[in-house]
Image: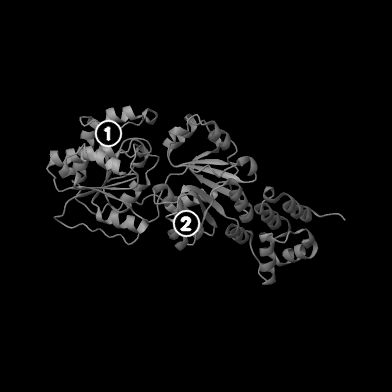
Amino acid sequence: MTMSPVAKLVRSYQDFGFKITAKLLLRYLARRIGVSRWGTRYLKRHYKEWIPAPNPIVQIIFELNSRHENVSSEDLARLMNSLVPIVHVVDTFSMGGLENFVLDLAASQKQMGINAVIVFTNGNGELAPEATKRGLAVHKITNQTSFQNFLVASRANYVFIHHAYSLINYEKMTDLNFVEVFHNPYWWQKGDLHLAKLREGFTAYVCVSSYVRNFVLQILKLNPERTIVIENAIPAITGLVRKKTEGRPHIFLNVGNFSEQKNQILLIRAFAQYRKQYFDFDAKLWIVGKGVSEAIKEAITNIVEPEVWSQIEFKQAKNSAEMHEIYGRADYFIQPSTYEGFSLASLEAMAHNLPIAISMTGGYLEFERDRLNVIRIPGITPDNESLDRQYIYETCWNPHSKQIRNTADAFFNLTQFRSTEFNIGQNRNYHSMVQQYNLIGKSNEFN
């Protein structure tokens, strides 16, 4: 029996699975026989014996035909997206900038008709309940075999990797499109031959700023033709309530896990100097994030006076609602990071109408463009390869360093903002950013 071109295509789809994608099948049907009532009946009558039973795309065509509906190729593509998921892989799905970004991105894709799924590998998934409320499926998968079985069962085609590599075995997953999102310059990955080999087969590399892209090209030596910049953005903040009360102490906010990158030791020293130099003895400093151990707290008590220590509060937010509340109670935001890819916390602070002070380094050099409520903290290094402990101590943690003086001045300059309506922190088009992620892989640029 001679097989027609359509029958051969369906047979190929059955034999090769992911290699002949559902997208190609839809495109062929639309262009050759037309996605019409006649076309679907013809397919059902003559080629049913070559169609694998679990094929969801053909099942959709038959279902729509049974309801006597004519469907455009765009509608079928939308239905295809609702079945075949985009998978986002993170390490720990806990409260953090990267994880919240993935949650917002996946939820937005879901609203656009794309079945986005989140997979995490470690921890207890603190953000999983919030993701479930927003209609997302969240799975904890801890080994490569289970992950591979999950991808096959879900018929996933695109996998976005957000700094999580333990599940990826590219040699056994060659039918998939892997897209790595670089949220920061990961300097410790320089010279990592295993990751370099793993990335060779990736479809694309997304960088959240030009600064991160330069790192990806110059340090990691990745293919520039597969690299794209999509600047971070955040969803619109609704129900914004400022809880500023006249006469109460100034509250300065810093958001980020306690680390050398976020530079909280310099921040604390500068806060102490600001109180003494500008006589703002009632000011408070809130540091929101993880990583503050008892040993760190004890070390801090040795570098600041007790009256300063009493005005510093370490907080944690369990979800975005609690974080929203913290932003609403703060007066100013300050982030003297040693480097930033493209700070989501700073975007959130601006979206809450907080004036912010940021260091002139890394992605912040791009971030502050057209931002009227930004104070720039000079003197903190933009050369991140030099970020060893000795360098940080000499330039940022030394109590007599100019970086501490500059940051103390930034505390004061923040208090000089009188307006409470900046109306600026959301001027980046979040919808456009999500669309750019959705289009990755659909362009011939990466195929």
**Circle 2: residue type:** Ser
Colouring style? one colour
Whether residue 391 is situated above or below residue 1 in the rendered picture: above
Label 1 Cα crowd, 10 Å radius (few <14 / some 14-19 / many 20+): some
Residue at disc 1, secondary structure = loop
Pick whichever, 224 or 162, lies toward us. 162
Q: Is residue 391 left or right of residue 52?
A: left
104 displayed left or right of 424 = right
Which disc, if any, is residue 378?
1
Spot the residue most to the bottom. Answer: 67
Left or right of 102 on screen, residue 339: left
Q: Which of 8 and 381 lies nearest the eye of the viewer?
A: 381
Q: Amino acid at mark 1?
A: Pro
Q: Is residue 412 above or below residue 187?
A: below
Q: How busy is the neighbourhood of tag 2: few (under 14 within 10 Å), some, or many (20 plus)?
A: some
- The x and y percentages for residue 293 are 31, 44
Tell me: 145 left or right of 389: right
Residue assigned mark 2: 108
Tell me if I can see residue 118 in this picture: yes
